[in-house]
Image (spheres, rainbow, N blue to C red):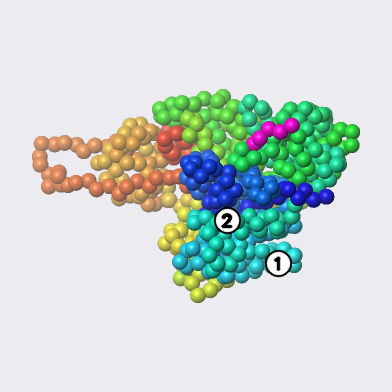
């Protein structure tokens, strides 16, 4: 039976194609906000990092009611590092809005999520956004979407997709780019007419498969999923069936449904709706919550993709520890990361056997750095080593490593440079297509080779290239890779950097510190122009004599130092180096601070 008063729709879009702005407009169109209400732009990007980076990190659920139909909107992250979220939340949807830029058309990140949506047989509605741009080509964008869906193996039915043209910024949607409609009604009408209502058994036994897990310090674990049959009541006794077949009884304490921008507690929820349940203590992805008397034990398993990159968090041992952060202890660091383990299912977090640190494994450097950024904003100080890929062993005993698919869009004149950079990073070209201005390259590349790759590609192509990569498979180990060519400038003592000393050092490489910055022995203060590390004195001052020299009044002109983001710092360091993370600074340092200790370690 179809639940006609509900539609469950996922939103798929590439970073910066206007997905979050479009959702804002749908909320306004369905009168979720009062006419005079002050509402922030991009209301779904609720955490600071999402607003600053302009990306969706966490999947979110909201609902809007239109013509008596409740539309559950499931926001999916556009970046492949958060793919673990995407695969699960699509299980709750019956259809998807694919938002593409009228100028750029579908992008590689769109392809990643769209392929999962097509595999699940979801009905796709294409929304061509930004049709108000002067260089927009809406028809061209639709053609590109059609070609992409053919390439991804869409069925004939999926290829017969409806198209809505929109300008989210200006708040209108149209069935044709040239008509004069100025509201979002055509898009809402299309969702109701084209996205199928959920096919459910309302009178059957309760069956709810958990797709995402949230965590509340007051309520414990919160399981979120779509109720596929029956009616779920609060205080109801249920059977929890784990993916491995283990079973146990539990009681549902509270049931929530998603209303507008938040959750609303209800006494009962009907099949077809997306619900959040509290009371299942160890709720996990793939768990089935069902009726104890008439249980449903078989539902399609939900795979959580394995992490491919790991980093070790340790308590900071820097001489400057405690100056900028409030929380510096190893115990607090461990407690914070184990709390993260409760709610962040796509990360694997475990203490090392020797208790020296906590290993956190995720889907890529961005995925890991988002957690680090969150923690430094909470006042933590800690240090992390170089990210290492997670290897596996094949059945025949050979070593396997994660392989990614990388795509590069680059102007034709720089295509050769881009191919050269990808080759040095271990990339193997699989496809090349070009038009009058741009070349589209596809490579297969080990995850190790993607570290720092974006910076190298941008440098080689004068900032013109666009690089995207996502995990493809585990493949045979491709051998050793060359690390950073240039050595580091290592501070020899603890103190503040002096302009006179930096003036001399900038002739021998690139600096990472400015005059007045706190430095300490073993800290990396710059990059040498040559191979091999160089110990330098950043505190050196000018010796004053009683003779006047011709260069005495020469003004010191320093090149601004290079500043690293967290991702850049993680990609830059070598195995014997660490990144020190504090609420105010990101510093690079040697693992062994003393030059004598480093020499001994080298000999051994």
Determine whether the residue tagged by mark 2 lies in a helix, strand or loop: loop
Residue 92 x, y percent position in the rendering? 72, 47
Is 426 situated above or below 589?
A: below
The alpha-carbon separation of the residues under discs 1 and 2 comes to 22 Å
Q: How many marks?
A: 2
Instruction: Determine which quarter of the picture holds residue 128.
Output: bottom right
Residue 203 x, y percent position in the rendering? 85, 42
Q: Is 264 a magenta residue? A: yes
Q: Tell which of 514 and 119 is nearer to you.
A: 119
- Locate residue 501 relative to residue 28 in the image: left or right: left
The residue wearing badge 1 is 160
Q: Which residue sits at x=85%, y=39%?
A: 205
The residue wearing badge 2 is 184
Residue 257 x, y percent position in the rendering? 69, 38
**Of the residues under marks 1 and 2, which one precedes in the sequence?**
1
Highlighted range, magenta: 263-267
Instruction: Determine which quarter of the picture holds residue 443.
Output: bottom right
Q: Which residue sits at x=30%, y=36%?
A: 516
**Residue 286 appears in the rendering:** no
Q: Tell which of 10 and 312 is nearer to you.
A: 10
Badge 2, how many Cα within 10 Å: few under 14, some, many 20+? many
Q: Tell which of 590 and 344 is nearer to you.
A: 344
Determine whether the residue tagged by mark 1 lies in a helix, strand or loop: loop
**Residue 61 appears in the rendering:** yes
Q: Is 229 a magenta residue? A: no
Q: Which residue sits at x=47%, y=45%?
A: 52
Badge 1, how many Cα within 10 Å: few under 14, some, many 20+? few
Residue 261 x, y percent position in the rendering? 60, 41
Overall secondary structure of the magenta section: strand
């Amino acid at each position: 039976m179809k639940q006609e008063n509900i539609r469950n729709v996922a939103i798929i879009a590439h970073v910066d194609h206007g997905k979050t702005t479009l959702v804002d407009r749908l909320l306004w169109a369905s009168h979720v906000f009062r006419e005079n209400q002050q509402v922030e732009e991009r209301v779904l990007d609720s955490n600071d990092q999402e607003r600053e980076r302009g990306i969706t990190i966490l999947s979110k659920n909201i609902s809007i009611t239109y013509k008596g139909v409740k539309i559950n909107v499931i926001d999916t992250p556009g970046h492949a590092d958060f793919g673990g979220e995407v695969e699960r939340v699509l299980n709750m949807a019956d259809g998807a809005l694919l938002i593409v830029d009228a100028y750029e058309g579908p992008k590689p990140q769109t392809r990643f999520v769209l392929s999962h949506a097509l595999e699940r047989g979801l009905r796709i509605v294409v929304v061509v956004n930004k049709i108000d741009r002067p260089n927009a080509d809406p028809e061209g964008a639709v053609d590109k979407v059609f070609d992409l869906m053919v390439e991804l193996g869409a069925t004939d039915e999926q290829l017969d997709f409806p198209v809505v043209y929109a300008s989210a910024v200006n708040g209108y949607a149209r069935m044709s780019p040239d008509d004069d409609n100025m509201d979002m009604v055509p898009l809402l009408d299309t969702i109701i007419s084209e996205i199928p209502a959920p096919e459910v058994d309302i009178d059957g036994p309760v069956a709810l498969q958990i797709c995402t897990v949230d965590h509340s310090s007051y309520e414990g674990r919160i399981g979120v999923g779509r109720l596929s049959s029956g009616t779920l009541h609060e205080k109801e006794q249920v059977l929890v069936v784990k993916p491995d077949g283990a079973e146990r009884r539990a009681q549902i304490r509270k049931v929530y449904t998603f209303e507008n921008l938040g959750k609303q507690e209800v006494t009962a929820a009907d099949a077809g709706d997306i619900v959040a349940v509290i009371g299942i203590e160890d709720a996990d992805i793939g768990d089935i919550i069902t009726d104890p008397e008439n249980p449903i034990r078989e539902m399609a398993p939900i795979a959580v993709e394995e992490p491919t990159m790991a980093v070790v968090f340790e308590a900071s041992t820097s001489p400057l520890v405690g100056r900028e952060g409030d929380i510096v202890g190893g115990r607090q660091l461990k407690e914070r990361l184990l709390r993260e383990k409760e709610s962040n299912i796509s990360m694997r977090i475990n203490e090392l056997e020797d208790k020296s640190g906590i290993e956190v494994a995720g889907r890529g450097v961005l995925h890991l750095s988002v957690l680090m950024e969150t923690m430094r904003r909470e006042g933590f100080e800690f240090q992390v080593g170089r990210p290492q890929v997670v290897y596996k062993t094949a059945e025949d005993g050979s070593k396997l490593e994660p392989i990614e698919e990388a795509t590069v869009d680059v102007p034709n004149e720089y295509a050769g440079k881009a191919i050269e950079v990808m080759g040095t990073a271990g990339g193997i070209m699989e496809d090349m297509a070009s038009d009058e201005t741009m070349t589209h390259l596809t490579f297969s590349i080990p995850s190790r080779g993607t570290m720092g790759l974006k910076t190298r590609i941008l440098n080689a192509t004068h900032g013109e290239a666009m690089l995207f990569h996502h995990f493809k498979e585990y493949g045979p180990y491709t051998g050793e890779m060359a690390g950073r060519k240039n050595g580091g400038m290592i501070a020899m003592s603890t103190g503040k950097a002096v302009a006179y000393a930096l003036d001399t050092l900038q002739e021998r490489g690139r600096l990472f510190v400015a005059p007045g910055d706190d430095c300490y022995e073993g800290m990396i203060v710059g990059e040498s122009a040559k191979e091999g590390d160089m110990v330098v004195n950043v505190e050196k001052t000018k010796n004053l004599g009683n003779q006047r020299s011709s260069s005495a009044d020469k003004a010191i002109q320093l090149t601004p130092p290079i500043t690293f983001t967290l991702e850049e710092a993680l990609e830059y360091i070598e195995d014997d180096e660490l990144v020190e993370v504090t609420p105010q600074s990101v510093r690079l340092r040697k693992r062994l601070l003393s030059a004598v200790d480093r020499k001994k370690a080298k000999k051994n």
